[in-house]
Amino acid sequence: MATLHNNVVPASGGGLDPANTGVFGGGYASYAVRDIMDYITIQTTGNATDFGDLTFARSSVTACADATRGVFGGGGYTNVMDYITIASIGNATDFGDLTIIMNYRAACADATRGVFGGGYKWPDKTDVIEYITIQTTGNATDFGNLTLARTSPTACADATRGVFFNGGYTNIMDYITIQTTGNATDFGDTTISTKNYRAACADATRGVVAGGYGSGHTTIMEYITIQTTGNATNFGDLIIARYGAGTCADSTRGVFGGGDPGQLNEIEYITIQTTGNATDFGDLTMGRRKSAACAGG
């Protein structure tokens, strides 16, 4: 019988249930970049458990996932991508390379394809979008461009459309159709601007973006309906004003973990279809900022 970790019900064939498992990777803590990965069971509450290690330590990494595999890309001014099998605890494996070397990127995915966009490498920021097929290792391919070059955006997706929020101290939202290639299109505006390092997640219809830094940090959460266009609407507040958090979601619940100020280890969650304030979930294995998270939901 498979060993149960963090109250996870084994998936078919044993191991963790990818649809109910969120994995946080990388980040910065105690004056050092980190290679640690830890995981949670999204539909429970409680502390995270060690999952394994990235191929090397880095901060400002980003992540996306399909139903079974997670990919961590960039960070640490590299173009490296690692992948994990979400059902199987263990270390990450090299996936391939992104087309550009950037920090502070955003990523999202549909059922087969992951997309990375934006970012910063001194002295330049970028509008480049690139994509991978998550189940096929190899290098990324050019997708198109964001409407504006910017650092530190965040992104989420439903089954067909990805949305990139903020970055570059703007309130811009762009969207793409993930299974096509081409340039992003204006979606609308968030209710707040001057915020970088926000965190976003989504269920099948709704995206939620939270926190951020710039002229102070914030607890504000906002939401959009991904298949429409228009401005974001207030959702509620995080418990802790934070930026640089890792974020993931299953089909109903979004989870925000870590971030600054103070290299947080606190995790909080929301029910994506229900507006309101976030609720305490538990703690990461190590407090850190600018980590990334993904889930197989």
Image: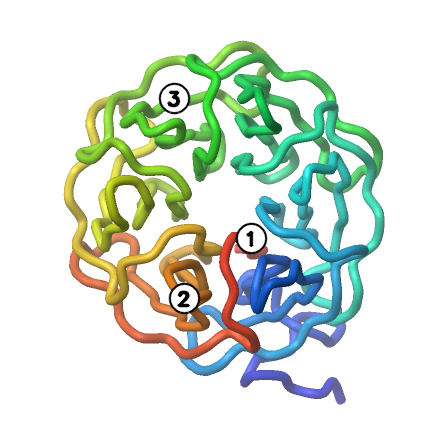
Picture coordinates of residue 141, whole percent (x, y): 73, 21
Q: How is the image coloured?
A: rainbow
SS class of the residue under badge 3?
strand
Residue type at numbered disc 1: Ala
Marks 1 and 3, how far apart at CA:
21 Å
Judge from the rendering whether residue 99 lies leftward or rightward of residue 114; answer left or right.
Answer: right
Residue 262: which disc?
Answer: 2
Picture coordinates of residue 85, whole percent (x, y): 74, 59
Residue 292: which disc?
Answer: 1
Q: What residue is rendered at 55% in x and 35% in y?
A: 105
Residue type at numbered disc 3: Asp
Residue 174: which disc?
Answer: 3
Marks 1 and 2, how far apart at CA:
17 Å
Picture coordinates of residue 124, whole percent (x, y): 57, 20
Please tell me which residue lies in front, 63 or 149: 149
Mark 3: give few (<14), some (14-19) or many (20+) Cα within 10 Å.
many
SS class of the residue under badge 1?
strand
Q: Earlier in the sequence, mark 1 or mark 3?
A: 3
Judge from the rendering whether residue 284 lies leftward or rightward of residue 223; answer left or right.
Answer: right
SS class of the residue under badge 2?
loop
Residue type at numbered disc 2: Gly
Q: Earlier in the sequence, mark 1 or mark 2?
A: 2
Residue 279 appearing in the image = yes
Q: What residue is rendered at 78% in x and 69% in y?
A: 90
Q: What residue is rendered at 22% in x and 23% in y?
A: 230
